[in-house]
Image: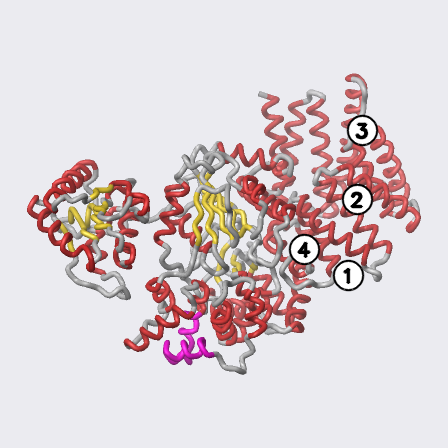
């Protein structure tokens, strides 16, 4: 599908003359006459238009029916809105046709380095005293050469292709306006491989205050310039939008690692490749093997980030092009830096009046004044545009009066002070007044939805979670009310609707506010829809809601998240709740810039469940980040009993173990075991579990004989105490089998121990299958049977029994895929073992 084509039988224009009426009208007339005399078909608009007028349909049609664009570039050329629009449309089409030299700039009084966008320099014809006739001859030669190679017009350009996003698409604003020059600056900057400071590949940063549209600009570039990055778009989102919070390198690295892991899962990396020590290398190899350029976006880098950390955030391989957004500035380490200010007068007015056009000249002037009042701030203008959709809208003059001189009874002071750290001088008061009216103008359902999102992290919020929070807070709930409230917030520019591409195919939802037409996930699949709220709006919402309201919503969020995570203990639906996990740190008071809630029993249990879920997802580092503050909170809380402290320390040790920090895990476990024994007794299940965990850690540290002896001790205690078919007994037996298979100082001893491990594994498998038969095919017992089968396969492979090992691994892979899902780390691990066995057979 193409943008537009001339009507059948209609002759295309060879040249479309683009000029500024004030200073190049005479040259345009002379060129039109000279080019026509040579035999070219030329379009020249003879009307002088006001800068506030939109591009006329007939002008757009003529441009799309042209083969080339001839902009007459002077120092004043960029000040013409219509010239900028025509150049952007022509370059955009030419880019997708594969050659932007269809746009040929005739320059006068402008140095080559000053031409914007710089793409106009691709084929430049300096006037340099030449007559219109001389210029026309050169232009005609170029036009005919182009036509001989490609006789198409701008309208023959294909529509922009949709890039592949990893792990999810970046929400772009449906209110995106202007920024044409910035889009081409990004395009040019990311192609500049010869820059001195590009660290091996191009790095472009987009900076600006909150709400200037940095993220939306990146999303727009990724879509419009998809041909620049056929390898796809890879997105890592950080949380650096609060300028009051100092950037912690460790926190940035941890959040960046989470982003890498999400990309790795979407790319289908194996469980081993997703391990923290292997992930960067595995991801680098996979991206390098794309053999195509790809776009690497790191969104919302904290202000004040140590520039030495910057190379760690850039694209992992040389075929990547890095695009960064930040509210700070990078003095080095980037190829180009683009600083966003407010929108220009035309684009700002266009955004403001997008829902309702002014009906009289006085209203147009008032709309212009309102655009100036809001400093062209895109987010502020989006909110103001939302106010024009209200039934009580009395016109732009009245809206300007309301925002310029707000009601004295409206207490803006706290909101202005709170947003003052986020916005430059002069922005905070009009923005706060607009935000206040927007929030108060929402329906009850809209305010409830926005308020619930305000107590959560600056990440997309699943609609199902919003529903559960509202229901738990006592507010009227239900999917229909949430959908209605969100639709109202979207119409007012206070929220966006997104859809997770990790669960379903991506759908462009940015143009729709009728949420009732979208799937509700009633077929049993996780609802992919989510609500995205700009961080500035979320922070303002928290100020506008009194502490009791925030507390009620936050408490409901703790309950909703806890219930969702607890359900995964037996349903194996960890991926379904993955989108909710980032919000746990917000509701437990662990997220900088948010309300600092105290960690009580409910919060400790939620953090514990979240850590377990992260471990089930194979993200040991995220689990560790949760258990460390949880353990500290338990030690400091006087109401926390000794048993709870020991259990949390035991889980923290497990998180260290999964993250590969075995010495730290051992230190904690050696502290917990004697304390457990003294508190509960040597035969208590919790004491034996702590000992078994310590035995696993000893094995990971290479102390296999000590590990075997301790596993044996625990197994015998459980066998005699709870019985040989108890799940805990069988779990420890599986660990003992692993330890036995690793023992031995010589080849002969190791072989003998592996043969013993095979015998133990066969016996344990019989017991596990018996237990699984009673519990069902999707139970922990069924997974236990698969785990021991996996251990059996590894020992058989070491003994050279490749056929039987392959059959065992394939059984494990198929079983885990049925229970845990295709992408679970344990499933991927079994799949990798199957491939290794197959390669051994071949």
- State the residue position of label 3: 740
Relative to 441, does residue 645 appear above or below in the rendering?
Answer: above
> How far is mark 2 from mark 3, CA to CA?
20 Å
Residue 435 place in picture, x, y as percent? 50, 71
Q: Quadrant of the C terminus?
A: top right
Dot 2 and dot 1 residues touching (CB under 8 Å): no
Residue 830 place in picture, x, y as percent? 64, 35
Q: Is residue 457 magenta?
A: no
The earlier-in-sequence mark between 1 and 3 is 1
Relative to 545, does residue 158 appear above or below in the rendering?
Answer: above
> How far is mark 2 from mark 1, CA to CA?
28 Å
Specify the segment rendered in magenta. Answer: 384-405
- State the residue position of label 4: 565
Dot 2 and dot 3 residues touching (CB under 8 Å): no
Dot 1 and dot 4 residues touching (CB under 8 Å): no
Dot 4 and dot 2 residues touching (CB under 8 Å): no
The earlier-in-sequence mark between 2 and 3 is 2
Q: Nearer the viewer, residue 305 or 752?
A: 305
The earlier-in-sequence mark between 2 and 1 is 1
- State the residue position of label 2: 727
Q: Nearer the viewer, residue 69 or 153?
A: 69
Dot 4 and dot 3 residues touching (CB under 8 Å): no
**By what rule are the colours in the image chosen?**
secondary structure
Q: Nearer the viewer, mark 2 or mark 1?
A: 1
- State the residue position of label 1: 601
Q: Nearer the viewer, mark 4 or mark 2?
A: 4
The earlier-in-sequence mark between 1 and 4 is 4
> How far is mark 1 from mark 3, CA to CA?
40 Å
**Which element is circle 3 on?**
helix
Residue at the image point whose x is 18% and y is 51% from the top: 17
Q: Nearer the viewer, mark 1 or mark 3?
A: 1
């Amino acid at each position: 599908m193409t943008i537009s084509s001339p009507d059948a039988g209609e002759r295309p224009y060879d040249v479309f003359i683009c000029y500024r009426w004030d200073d190049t009208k005479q040259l345009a007339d002379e060129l039109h006459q000279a080019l026509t005399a040579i035999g070219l078909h030329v379009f020249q608009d003879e009307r002088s238009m006001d800068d506030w007028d939109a591009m006329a349909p007939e002008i757009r049609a003529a441009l799309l029916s042209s083969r080339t664009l001839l902009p007459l570039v002077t120092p004043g050329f960029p000040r013409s809105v219509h010239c900028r629009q025509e150049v952007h449309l022509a370059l955009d089409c030419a880019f997708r046709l594969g050659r932007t030299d269809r746009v040929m700039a005739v320059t006068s009084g402008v140095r080559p380095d000053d031409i914007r966008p710089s793409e106009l320099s691709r084929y430049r014809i300096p006037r340099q005293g030449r007559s219109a006739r001389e210029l026309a001859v050169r232009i005609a030669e170029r036009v005919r050469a182009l036509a001989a190679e490609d006789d198409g017009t701008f309208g023959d350009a294909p529509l922009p292709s949709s890039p592949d996003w990893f792990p999810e698409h970046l929400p772009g604003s449906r209110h995106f306006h202007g920024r044409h020059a910035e889009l081409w600056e990004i395009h040019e900057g990311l192609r500049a491989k010869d820059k001195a400071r590009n660290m091996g590949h191009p790095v472009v940063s987009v900076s600006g205050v909150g709400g200037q549209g940095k993220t939306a600009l990146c999303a727009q570039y990724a879509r419009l310039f998809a041909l620049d990055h056929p390898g796809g778009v890879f997105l890592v989102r950080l949380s650096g939008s609060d300028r009051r919070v100092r950037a912690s390198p460790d926190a940035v690295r941890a959040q960046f690692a989470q982003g890498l892991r999400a990309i790795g899962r979407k790319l289908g990396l194996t469980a081993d490749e997703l391990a923290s020590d292997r992930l960067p290398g595995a991801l680098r190899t996979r991206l390098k093997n794309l053999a195509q350029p790809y776009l690497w976006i790191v969104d919302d880098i904290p202000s004040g980030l140590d520039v030495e950390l910057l190379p760690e955030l850039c694209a992992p391989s040389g075929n990547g092009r890095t695009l960064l957004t930040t509210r700070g500035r990078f003095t080095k380490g980037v190829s180009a830096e683009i600083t966003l200010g407010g929108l220009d007068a035309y684009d700002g007015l266009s955004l403001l009046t997008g829902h309702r056009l002014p009906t009289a000249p006085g209203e147009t002037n008032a709309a212009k004044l309102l655009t100036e009042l809001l400093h062209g701030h895109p987010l502020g203008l989006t909110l103001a545009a939302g106010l024009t959709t209200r039934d009580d809208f009395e016109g732009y003059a009245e809206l300007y009066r309301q925002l310029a001189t707000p009601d004295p009874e409206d207490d803006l002071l706290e909101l202005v002070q709170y947003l003052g750290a986020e916005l430059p001088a002069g922005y905070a008061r009009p923005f706060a007044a607009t935000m206040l009216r927007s929030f108060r103008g929402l329906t009850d359902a809209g305010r409830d939805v926005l308020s619930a999102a305000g107590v959560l992290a600056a990440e997309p919020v699943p609609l199902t979670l919003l529903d559960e929070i509202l229901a738990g807070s006592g507010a009227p709930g239900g999917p229909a009310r949430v959908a209605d409230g969100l639709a109202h917030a979207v119409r007012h520019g206070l929220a966006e609707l997104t859809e997770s591409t990790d669960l379903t195919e991506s759908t462009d939802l940015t143009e729709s506010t009728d949420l009732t037409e979208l799937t509700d996930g009633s077929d049993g699949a996780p609802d992919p829809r989510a609500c995205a709220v700009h961080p500035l709006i979320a922070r303002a919402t928290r100020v506008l809601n009194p502490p009791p309201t925030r507390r009620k919503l936050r408490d409901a969020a703790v309950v909703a998240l806890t219930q969702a995570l607890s359900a995964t203990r037996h349903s194996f639906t960890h991926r379904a709740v993955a989108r909710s996990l980032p919000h746990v740190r917000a509701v437990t008071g662990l997220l900088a810039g948010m309300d600092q809630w105290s960690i009580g029993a409910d919060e400790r249990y939620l953090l514990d469940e979240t850590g377990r879920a992260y471990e089930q997802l194979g993200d040991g580092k995220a689990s560790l980040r949760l258990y460390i503050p949880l353990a500290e909170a338990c030690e400091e809380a006087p109401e926390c009993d000794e048993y709870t402290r020991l259990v949390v320390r035991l889980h923290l040790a497990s998180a260290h173990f999964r993250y590969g920090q075995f010495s730290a895990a051992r230190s904690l476990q050696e502290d917990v075991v004697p304390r457990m024994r003294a508190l509960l007794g040597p035969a208590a299940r919790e004491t034996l579990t702590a000992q078994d965990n310590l035995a696993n850690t000893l094995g990971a540290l290479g102390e296999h004989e000590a590990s075997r002896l301790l596993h044996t001790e625990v197994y015998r205690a459980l066998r005699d105490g709870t019985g040989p078919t108890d799940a805990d007994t069988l779990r420890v037996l599986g660990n003992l089998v692993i330890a036995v298979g690793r023992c031995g100082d010589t080849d002969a001893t190791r072989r003998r121990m592996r043969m013993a491990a095979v015998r133990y594994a066969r016996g344990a498998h019989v017991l596990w299958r018996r237990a699984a038969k009673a519990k069902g095919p999707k139970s922990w017992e069924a997974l236990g049977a698969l785990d021991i089968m996996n251990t059996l396969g590894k020992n058989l492979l070491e003994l050279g029994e490749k056929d039987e090992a392959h059959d065992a691994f394939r059984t494990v892979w198929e079983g885990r895929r049925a229970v845990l899902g295709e992408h679970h780390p344990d499933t991927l691990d079994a799949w990798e073992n199957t491939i290794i066995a197959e390669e051994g057979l071949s």
